[in-house]
Amino acid sequence: MARRLALAVLLPLALLALWATAVQQRWVVEGIVPSPAQVARSWYQWIVGGPTRSLSPYSGTWLANVAYSGRRVLEGFVLAAVELDQCADIGKVKGPILRGLAARPPYFHNGSAATLSDVVEFYDQRFGIGFTAAQKADLVAFLNAL
Ligand code: HEM
């Protein structure tokens, strides 16, 4: 048992040493067989990232992706726990059809938006979109055309 265990540890170590020696002594071409240290560095780069470490999902490192996925799973559980008792309302409200919109102001169920410009203004402020004046005008023109 102890011999098997020793072998299980020693054999990989011996292979690692052989690999490192083979690269160091140039028995193999380094560009084709990289050294163990180079492989370890590449793994580290892939998992953790370079000197400018970032956990942003856009950094593309494995750790960042796992962290981001984990966060989303947690958020899902939290949302489910918080919203569970509010799910009774699902399906009770239907979004309005926007065809022929221009012909039937005021808008929203309580008529709180007198014009399509007010609708766009509402969305811009409620969701902090930051439309430019030109974008607002484009959107109103689009809604007018439906
Ligand atoms: C800039 C983006 C958006 C525009 C231009 C827009 C446009 C409109 C318009 C013109 C109405 C009024 C329709 C009517 O009264 O006949 C409306 C109502 C509504 N929209 Fe949007 N919408 C936008 C984004 C969204 C989003 C993201 C959601 C859902 C997540 C949404 C859900 C609804 C609902 C539920 C209503 C009915 C509200 C009520 O009657 O009080 N809209 N939308």
Image (cartoon, helix red, strand yellow):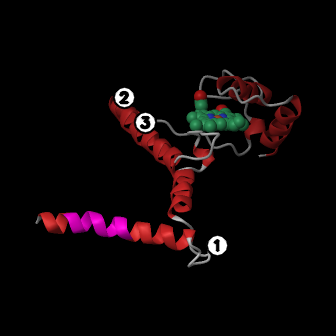
Image spot of residue 49 (x, y percent): 58, 47
Picture disc at residue 82: 2
**What residue type is disc 3 on?**
Glu
Image spot of residue 12 (x, y percent): 34, 67
**What residue type is disc 2 on?**
Val
Residue under the image location 36 percent in, 28 percent down: 82
- SS at mark 1 in the image: loop
Asked if disc 1 and disc 3 are in contact, CB closer than 8 Å, the reply is: no
Image spot of residue 115 (x, y percent): 77, 26
For the N terminus, the quadrant is bottom left
Residue under the image location 29 percent in, 65 percent down: 10
Residue under the image location 56 percent in, 39 percent down: 55
Residue under the image location 73 percent in, 34 percent down: 104
Q: Is residue 72 left or right of residue 135?
A: left
Q: Is residue 11 left or right of residue 144?
A: left
Q: CA distance from mark 1 to mark 2?
A: 55 Å
Residue nearest the observer in this picture, 75 or 13: 13
Q: Is residue 14 left or right of residue 39?
A: left
> Could you tell me if residue 88 is visible in this image?
no
Magenta-tinted stretch? 6-14
For marks 2 and 3 on the same chain, the one whose residue lies earlier in the sequence? 3
Per the image, the residue denoted by label 1 is 31
Image spot of residue 14 (x, y percent): 36, 68
Q: Is residue 112 above or below residue 83?
A: above
Q: Is residue 120 magenta?
A: no
Q: Is residue 13 magenta?
A: yes
**What residue type is disc 1 on?**
Gly
